Amino acid sequence: MAVSTSSDWPLTAFNNSSRRQKLQSPFPVRSRLFKTLPSLPFPCPKLVANLHATSSDCPSSVLEEPSSLVPLVEFKDQLPGSATLNAFLRGLFETPETEELAFECYKKAKARRDFKPEGSTVDLVAEYLMRAKKWESVSALSDDFKVYDLLPGAVTCARLISSCVEARKFRVVEGLLKVFVLNREVPVLAFAAAMREYNRLHMFSSTILVFERMQSSINPNLVDPACYFRAMEAHTKIGNTMEVIKLFEEFKSKEFGKAPFSGQILGLVCESLCKAGRVSEALQLFQDMRVNGIVIDPPASVYSSLVSSLSNAGEVKLAEELLTEAERQGKVLRDPDMYLKLVLMYVEEGMLEKTLEVVEAMRGPKKLRVSDCIFCAIVNGFSKKRGYRSAAQIYEKLVSLGCEPGQVTYASAINAYARIGLHSKAEEIFSEMETKGFDKCLVAYSNMISIYGKTGRLGEAMRLLGKMKAKGIRPNVWVYNSLLDMHGRVRNLKRVEKLWKEMERSRVVPDRVSYTSLIGAYNRAHQFESCIEFYHEYRAGGGGIDRAMGGIMVGVFSKSGRVDELVKLLSDMKTGGTGLDGRLYRTALNALRDAGLQSQAKWLQGSFEAIS
């Protein structure tokens, strides 16, 4: 035989000579194979057979050195067909060491007019590209899907989409989906995968766009429950409650029956109905789907969603009945948001003892952690409904039950103890709070500075202010109000003025209490002109007059002889419905009489008669 002179297929085959040895798989011999095979357009059937021959004792020299005993075959007229090439490519893709070579061969095969890849071949190509993270090649592969009018299997299509979204290759995803909708057998799993991954990345608008594309581009009957669930989930996350309800009506019309995701869909729809104020419809739907066997065993999340919604709506009885039913069916409800809403409902309804039952239920067999939000809601609820002393008592009760306060609860407890005068207890809690690392709570610092002011410990108050600043906590108007008041009471005008300028530099806007404390400080020091100056500044800024501010300025105008301004102040106070106490009434009346303003004195007596 002679060697073929064809430049297309210069392939060597082996005869059945007795001296011929069995060939070992050529792929481990990378030094020779990878130099030779890529230069060949494609091997012929005999080479495919030789490539799959196996032997354990064939030296590599058999492949490298020509033998006079090996006949050469002419293959010019024996080009491998499309099926043979597909089989050969699949064989290469099955071995990790030859995957890259297989892909190169696949690209060369596409240049042949008679080559058409089979579904199993493109499956392997897609799997390789995903493993190798060759996203540009994935984009090119999507063009092959369109050219050859075929797709990988549905599972592979879904994995392609998931991998591209996970790698943030959103343009590649877009290209794949465009090709998928053009195919006669649309891989719905791929669209469901895209929606799932977009929801996982909180790209809810993208999920909705994918769903709308499905509905407009393919047979609506192909849209499965998984797609409806992902679309409803996206609408729920962005607050489109009416869209969720609309999609559910469409879902029901498809008559899927007992379908996957029915339980999750039920939860989303019930939540949306409750948010729309249609609580009774949500409950009716819940009962109907169970009676009709669509949802036989609702998941715990459905119960949690319903109980949360009923709690928001103030439906105490219905929420409790549903909670009892869930426990009877062995459902362990672990949603902390649901328990918080239960607590808030009981607080709003004045059923404060029920809040303790919620805590005991969480701390019981479920062994759930009572969050700082729940702890704080209970303490603040008792404070609002029964006063600060009850709030302090319930705080100690919850701590004894094993609840751990967080930053917000600590701040509420400090405020409660400060209000009932237990300053040492408030300091103890503040110290405990700092020890646990909650050392940047502005409210707690504000309460402690107020306590130091009330107990005359101005030095400690200023040190705590410095500590706040060192930790990067910017003092607010409440902090400055406490400091202005405590220093004003001891007539430390130098410190008061310094604090006021600091407020201006820090752009902390003073409120009515700030001006009252400042004017009160100057009044105690008998600096009436400064009082009047800051009063006019306060009024020019639109500040109103309460009894505290009015009382100070009545005294200032009376003592400084500003009778006209006193009369105007009294007129403004009457218009605003602000009264005078007995002492200020007598001060104003005497000032008017001393000025000889008898008519104004009579007006004062008539206008503020109840006070006198």
Image (cartoon, rainbow, N blue to C red):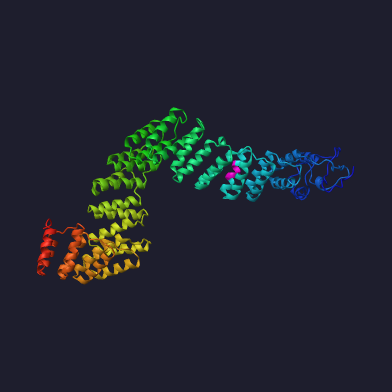
Residue at position x 33%, y 67% in the image: 504
Looking at the image, which is closer to me, 144 or 18? 144
205 relative to 142 in the view: left or right: left
Q: Main secondary structure of the magenta part?
A: helix
Residue 330 in sight here = no
Using the image as rendered, state which of residue 49 and residue 219 is in the foreground: 219
Q: How many marks?
A: 0
Residue for point 46% across, 31% down: 295
Q: Which residues are magenta?
A: 158-162
Horizontal relation, residue 386 to residue 209: left or right = left
- Counting from the top left corner in percent of width and height, residue 363 is at 35, 40
Question: Residue 220 occupies which quadrant of the picture?
Answer: top right
Q: Residue sitting at 44 percent across and 41 percent down?
A: 242
> Does the stretch in magenta take in 160?
yes
Residue 461 in view (yes/no): yes
Return the x and y of residue 472 as percentages of the image width and height.
38, 62
- The quadrant where residue 73 appears: top right
Is residue 114 covered in magenta?
A: no
Q: Is residue 212 above or below residue 486?
A: above
- State the quadrant of the C terminus: bottom left
